[in-house]
Amino acid sequence: MVTNVTTITSFGRSGLYDWMIQRATAVVLLVYTLFILGYVFFNPDMDYLQWRALFDQTWVRVFSLLALLSVGAHAWIGLWSVSTDYIKPTGPRFLFQVICGTAMFAFLVWGVQVLWGL
């Protein structure tokens, strides 16, 4: 008998959606990393004003926000998978997931404040 198991702590609706989100966020993070490394590589004498000018552009802020959201989703799915595989007692697993979720939320809010100057 096959049953559809859905938990409130998973990010997607099923394991397939979590897998797809994990892969999509990995691609976003790869492209963002290559962009930042390429920018640094092609501007070896870069100073603060050039770096600031890069991040003053709206598209770079949006791309950075997308990367930040991707880090959060990617990390949550990974930590959720690891915690459900290796932390069997419900109480400690839930506590671990709450701590990880709270930390990711705090980092996301902090990242938005840094990017958009809020």
Image (spheres, rainbow, N blue to C red):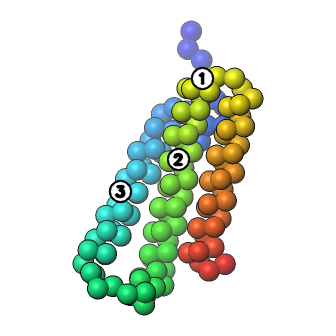
Q: Nearer the viewer, mark 1 or mark 2?
A: 2
Res. 30 in view: yes
Q: Nearer the viewer, residue 100 or 26?
A: 100
- Quadrant the C terminus occupies: bottom right
Q: Residue furthest left?
A: 42
Give the residue at mark 2.
75
Amino acid at the residue labelled 3: Leu
Amino acid at the residue labelled 2: Ala
Structural distance between the alpha carbons of marks 1 and 3: 32 Å
Q: Nearer the viewer, mark 1 or mark 3?
A: 3
Q: Is residue 30 left or right of residue 57?
A: left
Q: Is residue 49 above or below residue 118?
A: below
Amino acid at the residue labelled 1: Asn
Q: Which residue is found at the position 50% from the left and 54% from the top?
A: 71
Residue 18 horizontal/vertical position (percent) = 51, 39
Q: Is residue 24 above or below residue 10?
A: below
* Residue 92 found in image quarter: top right
